[in-house]
Image: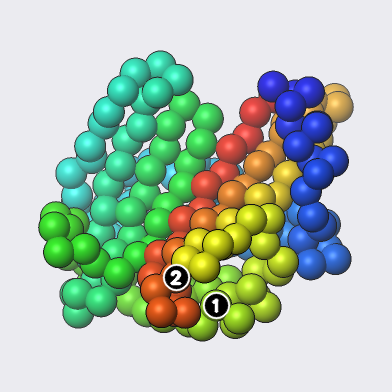
């Protein structure tokens, strides 16, 4: 895994001329930092009680919960697996069964300057040059090594995936993986 992370890091673009750690700013939402591995109980204290859906096991395990804004304009879905944590901010789907939350305001759903409905050029100006892109999808992947005391090494990968409809941001997913 470490060899793969190292090889991938050789081919990744720099984060708009800044260290890849700057991508950490996108891992914060509603006072939660994905690096802190927030619990679903802590999320419930802010957004309200919401069912948690669990699927898979071991390496394929994933747990999810979601919240819908009181004005039915946005949804935030939190998820985690064995080594990753993340969230998606998106427009509500017709089949969305997320818990209503008055705490999910437009300001809360604005992640380091990224917000639903923004134009693609503004998104790329905020996030930086994409790693991959198509007409409707833009991906960024940032990697760095986090050293703890005694030279303990953790490889961090932050992935941003944005989906656009008619040139405007429809969905934004942030995933943070940290392995040693």
Residue 130 vs residue 151, the one in the foreground:
130
Measuring 59% from the left and 50% from the top, which residue is drawn there?
A: 159
Q: Secondary structure at mark 2?
A: strand
The residue tagged 2 is 164
Residue 96 vs residue 108, the one in the foreground:
96
Q: Secondary structure at mark 1?
A: helix
Rendered view: 119 above or below 89: below
Pointer 1 with pointer 2, Cβ within 8 A: yes
Label located before the other in sequence (1 or 2)? 1
Measuring 78% from the left and 48% from the top, which residue is drawn there?
A: 12
The numbered dot on residue 8 is none
The image quadrant that residue 107 belongs to is bottom left
The residue tagged 1 is 120
Horizontal and vertical percent for residue 80?
A: 42, 38
Would you say 151 lies left or right of 74 here?
right
Q: How many marks?
A: 2
Horizontal and vertical percent for residue 90?
A: 35, 65
Tell me the distance, in whole angstroms, between the alpha carbons under discs 1 and 2.
7 Å
């Amino acid at each position: 895994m470490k060899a793969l992370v190292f090889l991938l890091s050789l081919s990744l673009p720099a984060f708009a001329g800044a260290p890849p750690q700057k991508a950490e700013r996108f891992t914060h939402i509603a006072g939660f930092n994905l690096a802190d591995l927030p619990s679903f109980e802590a999320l419930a204290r802010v957004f309200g009680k919401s069912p948690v859906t669990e699927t898979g096991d071991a390496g394929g395990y994933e747990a999810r919960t979601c919240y819908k804004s009181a004005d039915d304009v946005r949804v935030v879905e939190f998820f985690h697996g064995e080594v990753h944590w993340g969230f998606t901010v998106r427009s509500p789907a017709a089949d969305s069964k997320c818990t209503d939350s008055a705490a999910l305001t437009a300001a809360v759903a604005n992640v380091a300057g990224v917000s639903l409905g923004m134009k693609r050029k503004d998104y790329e100006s905020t996030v930086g040059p994409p790693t991959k892109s198509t007409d409707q999808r833009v991906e960024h992947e940032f990697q760095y090594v986090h050293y703890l005391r005694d030279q303990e090494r953790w490889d961090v990968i932050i992935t941003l995936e944005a989906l656009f409809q008619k040139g405007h941001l429809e969905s934004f997913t942030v995933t943070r993986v940290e392995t040693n």
